[in-house]
Amino acid sequence: MKRLLYIPLLLIFLLGCKSNENDSATPQSLASSIEGKWLMTETEVTVNGKKVWQTVNTLTPVYLIFRSDGVMLDGDGKASCCGPNELVINGNSLKIVPQSEVTYSLNCAAVNCVSCPVLDIEYSGNQMIITYCIGGRVKYIKN
């Protein structure tokens, strides 16, 4: 008889579990959600062996723009010379396939690319943290 009491408690527990809001989101819908202009606010640095967030210089703002197809642009609307091929947004992989023409800076011809083929993005609301393959992390807010 006591075992029967466990069944309703188990059901209540299971029904009370809330899934992450991005669990069922497709990578394409996440790419659309990060679409827009983002302002760099902080970079992660190591101080005395500990990683801390350091506010960036607000006098010269740095912007990052994402198109709905995942293409990453600089503040002037030019594609990164050595942009990624894939975004991992909250654990969901998105291969970047440009849906329209991509314009690059004239300086790209002189750049020897050693790019991060995959960027890891933690996205929530109006905040995004990008982790680069070389280990750097940068925080942005939606502008």
Image: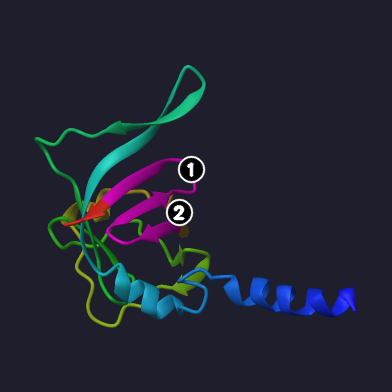
* Residue at 45% from the left image edge and 53% from the top image edge: 116
Categorize mark 2 by other alpha carbons within 10 Å: few (<14), some (14-19), many (20+). some
Residue 47, image x and y in percent? 43, 21
The residue nearer to you, when weighing 40 against 75, is 40
Q: Residues within 10 Å of mark 1 (few under 14, many from 20)?
A: few
> Residue at the top extreme?
48
- Taking the magenta stretch, the answer to whether it contains residue 122 is yes
Amino acid type of the residue tagged 1 in the rendering: Ile
Q: Which residue is mark 1?
A: 134
* Residue drawn at the location 11% of the way across and 38% of the way down: 60
- Image quarter for residue 13? bottom right
- Which labelled disc corresponds to residue 116? 2
* Range covered by the magenta-colored residues: 120-140
Amino acid type of the residue tagged 2 in the rendering:
Cys
In this picture, is 96 found above or below 82? below
Image point 30% across, 67% down: which residue? 34
Q: Which mark is residue 110?
A: none
**Is the N terminus in the top left, top right, bottom left or bottom right quadrant?**
bottom right
* Residue depicted at 45% across the width and 78% down the height: 25
- Please tell me whether residue 53 is drawn above or below residue 63 in the rendered image: above
Quarter of the picture holding the C terminus: bottom left
Instruction: Tell me where residue 61 appears, x and y as whole percent.
Output: 14, 43
Q: Earlier in the sequence, mark 1 or mark 2?
A: 2
